[in-house]
Amino acid sequence: MTARQDPGEPGGRAPGRPRRPDASMSLLADLLAGKLLDPGYAEAAARRARRPDAPGGPLRRGRRGGGVLLVLVLTGTLIAVAGAEVRRSEPVAAERRSRLIDEIDARTAETDALRRRLDRLRAETERQRAAALARGDAGHGVRSRLARAAAAAAAAPATGEGLVVTLDDSPRDDPDGLAARGGARGRVYDRDLQVLVNGLWAAGAEAIGVNGQRLTATTAIRSAGEAILVDYRPLTRPYEVTALGDPGRLRDAFTGSAADRRLRALEERYRIRYGTRGAPDVRLPAAGPVRLRYAVPREEDGQ
């Protein structure tokens, strides 16, 4: 049995050849493959492809490559200029910093000299006042009252035995102290000194000094950058807080207090150095003059 023959079938199928099962789909397949494009359309598409500025043509590819190269050149130029500016500004910043440090050192030395002169003038004034008050009976009572007021206002030097508390940053070569406060090694902050000073006052200290600077009721302990200031004067490590009073009584009252527990916790966690010792002979200088902003002298009756 032979397949049915169709001499008039489109596509020029030879007589006697069997018909393909998908012959009816050949037109759709040719359309999808682009084989039946009209000759006019095909010629126009070929002309566009041959144009230099056609998409994907040589000119377009050259422009695109040139744009990428221009962007890379501009980026490299900007990076080079920024690097040159940074390198140029480093010596200037270092020179300014050096001049600023020299100026700070000079002003600090000048202030220290003026303070020493002030202490000498105060001592001379105190001697002359004491001599004047000693000439009469009424002067003895005035002198006693002045001495008590000066001690309360830290206007006169204080001497005696006391307790010295030392605080310092963790050692630089301590690996356990590196995982510390603020991502840096364990450091002593102004608030730590504030807690310590308040704890010593609460323990019964008669007078307190930090690194030789006498504290008063209006003394401010704060920070500026990484420096700790006491009445705007910078401190250097280690920080020694001296409390005037009986060392045994002060140590017993201070041990176990909130301030002591805080400092012990900082010592254990951040390796901050913290220690106490008794001092048989302590001398605290007089504090600076207090400028009254709101208080005024009380007028005596009859004046």
Image (cartoon, rainbow, N blue to C red):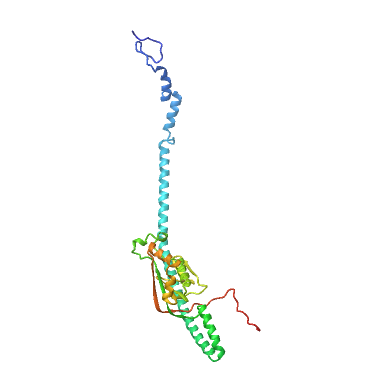
Image quadrant assignment for residue 292: bottom right
Res. 246 in view: yes
Res. 185 in view: no
Residue at the bottom extreme of this rendering:
135
Quadrant including the C terminus: bottom right
Residue 206: percent from the left, percent from the top?
47, 76
The image shows residue 188, relative to residue 208, as above or below, that is: above
Residue visible at 43% across and 44% down in the picture: 67
Image quadrant assignment for residue 28: top left
Q: Who is closer to the viewer here, 238 or 55?
A: 238
Residue at the top extreme of this rendering:
1
The image shows residue 118, relative to residue 67, as above or below, that is: below
The image shows residue 73, relative to residue 13, as above or below, that is: below
The image shows residue 93, relative to residue 116, as above or below, that is: above
Residue visible at 43% across and 26% down in the picture: 42
Residue 61: percent from the left, percent from the top?
41, 39
Residue at the right extreme of this rendering:
302
Q: Who is closer to the viewer here, 190 or 46?
A: 190
Q: Who is closer to the viewer here, 241 or 41?
A: 241
